Every structure is written in structure tokens, then in C-alpha cells.
Image (cartoon, grey):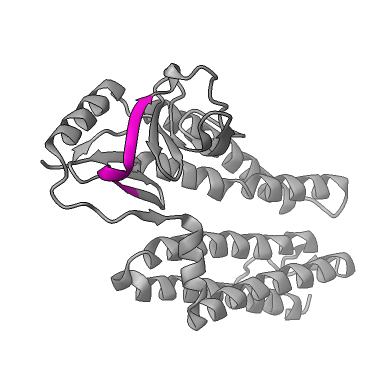
Amino acid sequence: MTADHFPPPRQRGLIVHAVILAILVAIAVTGVVNISRLEIGTEFLISLLAAVFSFLPIPIFAYRAYSLLRADYLLDRDSLAIHWGLRLEDIPLTDVEWIRPASDLTQPLSLPALHLPGGLIGSRRHPDLGLVEFLASDARKLLLVGTSKRVYVISPENPAALLQAFARATELGSIKPAEPRSVFPSFIVSQAWKSSLARFLWLSALFLNLGLFIWASFIIPTTPRVALVPFFAGSPLQTVPSSQLIIFPLASLLLSVAGWIAGLYFYRWERERVLAMIVWGSSTLTGLLFLLGVLFVIATPI
């Protein structure tokens, strides 16, 4: 019996996450553009805070959208596998005690905090079931998977088809019982942290970005204008408000976060770990180049 796929509903959740990401990106870009034009003052501070606080959730919502896009439930005679982004739960079918719709409960399930269409992720405690972990996308199609350790909540596009496939697989019996396996995103981070090279690259990028922010915050109040606009030989030197230096640490932070996430993605596979180190090394090098860029700007006489 080959594995049957029962993917969750994706369209509504992807649309919601795409709209949220578009709004956050628009606010962040608008904030950065305003920062590059304003002198230091109230409007500058508001634009800076808007850019920072709109950027921070972008990796979270981007990961949630990626998780939903790649989410799947696979069922065969040996196991039920739940894939959700970097989260993997492979449950031997012999450990699955029952599967039933959430609508059968006498006391309704409480959805996870901060739930969105396409992103019912997290754990809750139910008075009858105990610890319940959600790996679902649609509250209208929830199925409960009961095991000896905990109950999982999933939402296949066709719950009835999964229930029928589970009944058929149970009747046929397991050929080769699978080994239980749980992989969490935090496990990949902790596994990478054990590598001395990864720790060095992460900490180097972190301290370079912190140093860049601190240095820019000292330069901006004390230096009214800097030579940031490109100019040709022989042309008069053009200057801009020093507040535009904040673009350097913001861009460096953006690239560092993107590189860190991309490196974790590649680090999942043994054969791709060299590529992960290259990506993390590039983030460190980028931070150093931005640091040298600020040094070049302030060293240019005006």
C-alpha cells in the first residue's frame, strides 16, 4: 500500500498570509523611504519605528505561508506522517489509537492563540483529551488523531477520505512498523548551534549588526550631513542628512535575517550543510561590508 496524500486546504490561508505580508512590506518600505528623506525629529522616529516593527513579523508570516504551502498528511499501512514546514511528526500506525472528527467532542476545542486561516498552529489543553497539538489550516475540517502521548489536530481537505484510508490501513495491518520520529524547528537551530563554525558565523553577524546600529546612532546626532550620494569625478560633492545612515544597519539586518533563515533551511540535510555555512558566511561578510561602507561615508570630507 503506497502512501496516500491528504493535503490541508491552502487557498484561503495563502491569500490571508499574502495580504498580511504585502501590508507589512509596504509599511516597512514606506518607513525606510521616509527615513532616507527626513531630518532627525518626531517624523523620523515614527518612520524608524514603523519600519522596524513592520519588518520583525515578516519572517514569521513568511515561514507560516511556506509551512502551509508545503504541508501534507501522508498515510500508509505503517505510519501517519504530518509535514508542516520544518515540523515533522511520523507516527507509527500501531501507536494511533483512534481518529475522529473534532465535532464529536462534547466540549469544543479551543483554537490556538493568534490563529489565522491557514495557520492553526500551537498547543492547547483540553479537559478530556489533555495536551492537544494543532497542525491544521481550517477550523471547519478538524480531525483528532489520538496517540498514547498526545492528541494531534489535523485538517485534511477531505476528512472522510482520510478516515476511510485509516480504516482500510488498520484492517490490512502493518507490514513493517515504523519508528516514531518528531522534528521541531527548534531542533534544527539547536543542532546547528552545536557546530563551532555555525556559532562563530551567527555571533559574528549578530555583533556586526549590533555594532553597526550603535555606531550609526552615535554618528547621526553629531554629524549633520554626510556624502552619501554618488558623484562623478570633477562634479560638485553632494551631501544628504546623516539620518540616511540608518539605511545601512537596516539593510544589513534584513539580509542577515534572510540569510540565517535560508541557512537553517539548507542545514536540514547533511549534504547541503556546506551550502548553509556559505550562506551564513555571506551574511557575516555582508555585515562587514556595510560596516566598511559607513566608515567610507564618514571619512569622506565634505
Tell me what residue is drawn at x 44 percent, y 45 percent: 149
Between residues 207 and 29, which one lies in front from this camera angle? 207
Q: Is residue 287 above or below residue 142?
A: below
Q: Is residue 233 visible?
A: no
Left/right of residue 198 with respect to residue 142 in the rendered view? right
Relative depth, front residue between 85 and 219: 85
Measured as percent of width and height from the top left, residue 229 is found at 66, 64
Of 146 and 221, the residue lying toward us: 146
Residue 112 occupies quadrant: top right
Q: Is residue 16 above or below residue 82?
A: above
Nearest the viewer among 142 and 178 is: 178
Percent position of residue 148, x then y? 41, 43
Tell me if 253 is positioned left or right of 260 in this view: right
Residue 265 shown in magenta: no
The percent coordinates of residue 78 (x first, y second) are 20, 46
Total tally of numbered discs in the picture: 0
Residue numbers of the magenta segment: 90-100
Residue lying at 82% horizontally and 65% vertically, measured from the top left: 220
Residue 65, picture quadrant:
top left
Where is residue 298? Give x, y as percent.
75, 76
What secondary structure prevails in the magenta region?
Answer: strand
Report whether 283 appears left or right of 155.
right
- Answer left or right for 204 relative to 154: right
